[in-house]
Amino acid sequence: MDRVDFHMHTTFSDGSYTPTELLAYAKEKSLRAVAVTDHDTVSSHDESKAAAAKHGIELIPGIEISCQFEPGTLHILGYFLNPKDPGLLKDLENLQKARAERNPMIIERLNKLGLKITLDEVIQQSGGDQVGRPHFAQVLIKKGYVKNNEDAFRYYLGKGASAYVDKRRLSAKEGIEMITKAGGLAVVAHPKQLKVSDRARLIELFKEWKGYGLRGVEAYSSCQKRDEQKFWHELGNELDLIVTGGSDFHGKNKPDVDLGWMGNGVTMGYEIVDQMRAALQTA
Ligand code: AMP
Ligand code: ZN
Ligand code: FE
Ligand code: FE
């Protein structure tokens, strides 16, 4: 079995497995190749690489960048990029700064709403690396302010909720170019989350992004239902994009998603790795 998974998170962003634990789990799941795609950071790369080598798994360097978009969210995955690229590291540092500016503002809002929570508690929850909203959610759950992650986002942290604070984000063009310049292939993650249902509008958007260098679309995401996956596979083909897939595994932080499964019983074969490699040759 030559299964692969192209979308997963470690403790360096908002997953619950360290890179070492994640790669051990990938071995248990008999995955041949994986891409670790932490949000806005490649800091897990060295540890992931060492663990992958130990288990004989092929590690594809990856990332997931949150870009500006309305009405939904636009996440761009990057594959095969050089995690040591100086331009990339500089851009990522700026994204970390934007996060560091936003996080205390979320605390301030939560405090104003009467919730007792400190930034230190959230930092501790994050394990000391990147701090994201899911870490705020975990602290709110632990303190009994909400019963689960979904409610934490619905009432406080999600877009438009009472303690929501936006952060500076890259435009789609900047996100795609950042990945491409670092030698990577840019792919739109879980396109359902764009929250655009008009087909003509979607085609327009993807054509624009292709103009910036977009190469693929993640049709097979665990957050998309079978008919949605089919829709995105067809649209991807029509737009001449590589059709990819990934679980979006976050460990205990997203308990209903397991590594190696793209939802609806779907798994991905190794052919996709060859297809991406071929695409890299035709930049
Ligand atoms: P951040 O990068 O800190 O803004 O946090 C973004 C992360 O929060 C996403 O990658 C999701 O894991 C999570 N998230 C965002 N919106 C929601 C939502 N409505 N429900 C659950 N999780 C969400
Ligand atoms: Zn995440
Ligand atoms: Fe995402
Ligand atoms: Fe993700």
Image (tube, rainbow, N blue to C red):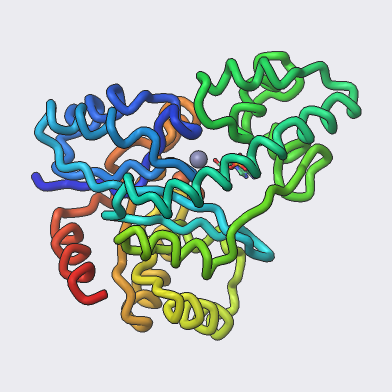
Q: Measured from the top left, where is residue 185 in percent x and y? A: 32, 63
Going by the image, does 50 lie left or right of 235? Answer: left
Report which quarter residue 252 is drawn in. top left
Q: Residue at x 83, y 21 (%)?
A: 115
Q: Measured from the top left, where is residue 172 in percent x and y? A: 54, 67
Report which quarter residue 20 is drawn in. top left
200 in relation to 258, above or below: below
Going by the image, does 161 lie left or right of 80? Answer: right
Report which quarter residue 105 is drawn in. top right
74 in relation to 49, above or below: below
281 in relation to 157, above or below: below
Query: Which residue is farthest front?
Result: 86
Residue 219 is at least partly visible in this image: no
Q: Residue at x 22, y 25 (%)?
A: 24
Q: Measured from the top left, where is residue 155 in percent x and y? A: 77, 37
Q: Residue at x 16, y 69 (%)?
A: 278
Q: Image quadrant for the N terminus?
A: top left
Q: Measured from the top left, where is residue 158 in percent x and y? A: 70, 43
Q: Image quadrant for the C terminus?
A: bottom left
Going by the image, does 134 lie left or right of 181? Answer: right
Residue 119 is at least partly visible in this image: yes
Q: Residue at x 71, y 14 (%)?
A: 143
Front position in the image: 137 or 38: 38
Front position in the image: 248 or 67: 67
